[in-house]
Image (cartoon, rainbow, N blue to C red):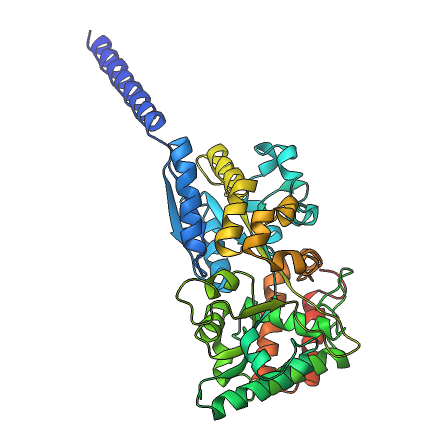
Amino acid sequence: MTAMKGRGHSLLAASVIMLWVFYCNSVAAAAPARLAISCGALGVQLRLCQEGVEAWSRQTGTPVKVVATPNSSTERFALYQQILASHSPDIDVFQIDVVWPGTFAPHLVDLSSYIDGRFTQQFFQTMITNNTIDGALVAMPWYTDAGVLFYRKDLLQKYGRSPPQTWQQLTESARIIQNAERAAGNTRMQGFVFQAKGYEGLTCDALEWIDSFNGGTLVNSAGKVTLDNARAAAALDLAASWIGDIAPKGVLNYDEEASRGVFQSGNAVFMRNWPYAWALGNAEGSPIRGRIGVMALPRGGDQGHPSATLGGWQLAVSRYSRHPALAADLVRYLTSYAEQKRRAIAASYNPTIKALYQDQEVLAAVPFFGTLYDSFEHAVARPSRVTGSKYARVSAEFYYTVHDVLSGKSAAAPALAALQKKLIRLSRGEQW
C-alpha cells in the first residue's frame, strides 16, 4: 500500500511538471515576437533606420528595438565580434560593413533560404557576390558608398579656380583660397578636411590616394602585397604635406562627422567624404546650403586616375536570432526598392538597386548620382575577400602606418617597405 502511495505521488509530481512545462511553452509561444536591429548613427542614419523599422512594424505588428552603435566602424566591428562570439540572441539584424561578410559569415543566416532569387536580381550583382560566402548569402546590400570630393562652388568661383582634376591642383587651390579667406578675416578657414584618424576611414582615404597614383591596392586580387613602390610613397608624401598647411593638425583625429562639421560650418574649401554629407550640407539651416559641389576624387597627377574606395553597408541576420524568418522579412523590407528610394531622396544614400539610378525623382533630389555613377560602380575594393579573416589586421597595420607618415613620425618610403614585409609575414608568404 505504501509503495502504491509512493508511486501515486511520483505520477502526480510528473504530471504537474509536464503541465508546468506545457504551460510555459504555451506562454512562450503566445508571447509576441520582438526583434532588435543594430543601426549606425552617422549623420541621419539612426533616424532613417527608425523610420523604416517603424513602417515595417506597423505592417507586421512586430515591435522592433533599434540599437544605436558607434560611428567608428573599427569600434563597431569590435562590438559585433563580442556579441556574435557569445552567441547572444539580443540582436537579430546587424548592419555590417562591406568588408565584414567573410569574417562574420559563420555567425550569419543564409538569407537565400528566406529571400527569393527574383528579389536579389534587382541588385548590383557584384554586391550580391561580395555578400555570398561559400555559397551562402549572408547579407543583403542596403546602401553603397564611394568616396567623393565636396567643394565650395562659391569660393572656387570667387577666386577663379576650376574644380581640381589632380591632387596637386587641389593642393594649390586649397592653399590659395584658404590663405585669401584668412587674410579677409576668416581665420578658421581650412583648405581641405578628410578622415585621418587611425581607424578604418583612414584605410579608405589612403587607398584612394595610393591607387590614384597607380601605386597599387594594398593587396591585389592574387594575394600579392603591392605597397612598396615609389608611386605609393609619392601619394603619402603629398598627403603628409597637407598637415599643418591646407589641413589642420587636428585632422589627424578626424572621422567622417568631424570632417563634415568643419566643412558644413563654412570653414573648409574641400572635403573628402561619403555621399551622405550632401543632404545634410543642403538641409535647411545649413550655412553652406546651395553652395556645395560634388565631383569624383582627383587623380594622382597626369599619369594617374580618379579612385574612390568602395564603401557601403549591408543587413545580416544573426544565426542566434530566435526569429530568423521575421528578421529576414525585415531585411527584405529595408532593402526594397521603395525603402531605398525613400532613403536616397531624404538623405542621399546610394541605392544598391540598379534601376534607382534611372529613377527621375531620385535624380532630381540627388543630381550627382547620375554624373558619378561610374565612380560608384567601379570603386576600388578593399582587399577583404582575398585576405579573409585577416583583413581587420591588414587594415589596422595599414592605417597605423599611414597615420605615422601623416603625423611626421616616419617617411613614406621606409614606412611602406617595412609594412610590406610585415604583411607578407602575416600572409605566410603569398597565401592568405
Q: Is residue 89 visible?
A: no
Residue 182 is left or right of residue 337, and the answer is left
Viewer-side residue, 216 vs 259: 259
Residue at 36% x, 26% y is: 29
Q: Is residue 92 above or below residue 202?
A: above
Residue at the far bottom in the pictured view: 183
Residue at the far top in the pictured view: 1
Residue at 70% x, 77% y is: 166
The image shows a total of numbered marks equal to: 0
Snapshot quadrant of residue 283 = bottom left
Point out residue 347 in the picture as x, y percentages from the top left corner.
Answer: 49, 55
Point out residue 431 in the picture as x, y percentages from the top left corner.
Answer: 75, 61
Viewer-side residue, 89 vs 166: 166
Residue 54 is left or right of residue 409, and the answer is left
Point out residue 138 in the picture as x, y percentages from the top left corner.
Answer: 59, 43
Viewer-side residue, 89 vs 101: 101
Q: Quadrant of the N terminus?
A: top left
Snapshot quadrant of residue 41 = bottom left
Q: Quadrant of the C terminus?
A: bottom right
Residue at 38% x, 35% y is: 58
Q: Is residue 333 above or below residue 268?
A: above
Q: Is residue 398 above or below residue 406?
A: above
Point out residue 205 in the picture as x, y percentages from the top left corner.
Answer: 61, 71
Snapshot quadrant of residue 223 = bottom right
Q: Is residue 274 visible?
A: yes
Viewer-side residue, 308 vs 83: 308
